[in-house]
Image (cartoon, grey):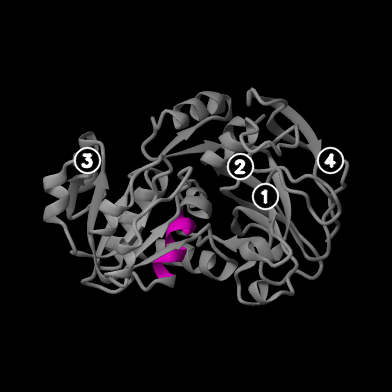
């Protein structure tokens, strides 16, 4: 199969400076290598990481920044050594597009934790020195290892948010054996990650309690997402009634919040997993020592877990709640995301709006 030329233009939207304002942009993707997959992007989820790097929140943005690491699309070409994919396959690309492929973590399917550092899908520096550009674009070329098969019966628009939001909660749930029917799960925060934690929890047969400071989220938590209970975390009486009743807690909140009140909800040997990014984490040693409790952290997931999650979602009919938007609405979407004004994930319709 002949490879496409590296001179072919890729249409995209990019930020040129820390204002983060996105506008049309053209650049060249690399030529197809023997182990590569080239895919036409149909959809891309909008993640808070897109805000972080388009606006230089960490001081390391490499402009122009083409954001997007929740990518779904259709294979248009494969390299001569590729055996896992063929033209026409539905595929996804997540938060990283390269790693050493030889360390203990890569060998264990945990490429995101590569000992030499995984290469982020956008604003990363690849092994050849080029800066990676993400999914707010017409197509992408990646090594087949970092491509995932999306089952044909699963909508591409629904698959996109799973590649970051979904895998970020699925991975620690599986690692800490939160898939045991009858166990109890608390979910802190009900945004893009939290709502998927609720859906996974119910699919695993858990009794799910949503913990939120916002009473306005109660109806959707119970009636739309299927949570068993909703607790206003700022209400001391409601929290006391839940004391020592949860086996697990997934904390998806990125705003600063106290940890001792939540740790008190765990049973003996309970586990709290942090997947959000508050500015600091503080708790009393007694909150974990006296109850043999564990506080853990997790970030996205490896290739093995990601493929397993996609297959699980297709088999069990798990779909994120999404608002599909055109690329021309991307700036407004990022502003709304900052204000937490989305239920529960924006997905850009690249295929029909990026022209």
At label 4, counting other C-alpha atoms closer than 10 Å, the crowd grade (few under 14, some 14-19, many 20 or more) is: few
Spatial separation of the CA atoms under disc 1 and disc 4: 20 Å
3D distance between C-alphas at marks 1 and 3: 38 Å
Label 1 neighbour load within 10 Å: few <14, some 14-19, many 20+:
many
The image shows residue 53, relative to residue 311, as above or below, that is above
Q: Which of pointers 3 and 4 indicates the residue nearer the eye?
A: 3
Secondary structure of residue under mark 2: loop
Residue 149 image offset from top left, x and y in percent: 57, 63
Residue assigned mark 4 = 8
Which residue is label 3 attached to?
A: 234
Q: How many marks?
A: 4
**Looking at the image, residue 49 lies above or below residue 311:** above
Range shown magenta: 166-174
Of marks 1 and 4, the one in the foreground: 1
Overall secondary structure of the magenta section: helix
Q: Identify the secondary structure beneath mark 4.
A: loop
- Quadrant of the rendered structure where residue 138 is? top right
Q: Report if the CB atoms under discs 1 and 2 are less than 8 Å apart.
A: yes
Q: Is residue 268 visible?
A: yes
User: Is residue 224 a member of the stretch shown in magenta?
Assistant: no
Q: Earlier in the sequence, mark 3 or mark 4?
A: 4
- Asked if residue 46 shows in the view, the reply is no
Q: Nearer the viewer, residue 268 or 115?
A: 268
Residue 32 x %, y %: 82, 55
Mark number for residue 68? 2
Residue pictured at 56% horizontal, 48% vertical: 70
- Judge by depth and name the residue closer to the eye, 85 or 335: 335
Tell which tag, 3 or 2, sits nearer the viewer. Answer: 3
Q: For this view, does 237 lie left or right of residue 294?
A: left
| Disc 3 to disc 4, C-alpha distance | 55 Å
Residue 65 is situated, as x and y percent measured from the top left of the image, at: 71, 35
């Amino acid at each position: 199969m002949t490879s496409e030329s590296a001179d072919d233009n890729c249409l995209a939207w990019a930020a040129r400076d820390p204002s983060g304002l996105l506008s049309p942009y053209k650049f060249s993707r690399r030529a197809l290598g023997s182990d590569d997959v080239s895919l036409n992007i149909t959809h891309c989820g909008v993640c808070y990481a897109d805000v972080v790097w388009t606006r230089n929140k960490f001081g390391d943005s490499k402009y122009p920044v083409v954001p997007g690491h929740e990518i779904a699309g259709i294979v248009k070409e494969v390299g001569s050594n590729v055996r896992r994919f063929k033209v026409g396959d539905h595929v996804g690309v997540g938060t990283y597009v390269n790693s050493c492929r030889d360390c203990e973590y890569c060998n264990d399917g945990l490429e995101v934790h590569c000992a030499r550092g995984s290469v982020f899908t956008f604003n990363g520096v690849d092994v050849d020195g080029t800066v990676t550009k993400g999914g707010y674009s017409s197509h992408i070329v990646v090594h087949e290892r970092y491509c995932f098969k999306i089952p044909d019966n699963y909508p591409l628009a629904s698959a996109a948010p799973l590649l970051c939001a979904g895998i970020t909660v699925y991975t620690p749930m599986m690692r800490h054996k939160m898939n045991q029917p009858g166990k109890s799960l608390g979910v802190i925060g009900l945004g893009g990650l939290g709502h998927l934690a609720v859906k996974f929890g119910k699919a695993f047969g858990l009794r799910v309690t949503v913990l939120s400071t916002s009473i306005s989220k109660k109806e959707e938590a119970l009636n739309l997402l299927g949570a068993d209970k909703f607790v206003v975390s700022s209400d001391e009486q409601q929290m006391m009634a839940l004391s020592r009743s949860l086996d697990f807690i997934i904390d998806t909140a990125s705003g600063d919040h106290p940890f001792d009140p939540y740790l008190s909800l765990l049973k003996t040997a309970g586990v709290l997993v942090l997947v959000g990014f508050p500015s600091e984490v503080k708790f009393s040693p007694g909150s974990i020592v006296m109850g043999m409790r564990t506080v853990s952290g997790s970030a996205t997931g490896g290739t093995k877990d990601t493929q397993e999650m996609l297959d699980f979602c297709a088999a069990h009919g798990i779909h994120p709640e999404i608002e599909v938007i055109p690329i021309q609405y991307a700036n407004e979407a990022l502003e709304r995301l900052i204000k937490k004004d989305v239920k529960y994930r924006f997905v850009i319709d690249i295929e029909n709006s990026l022209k």
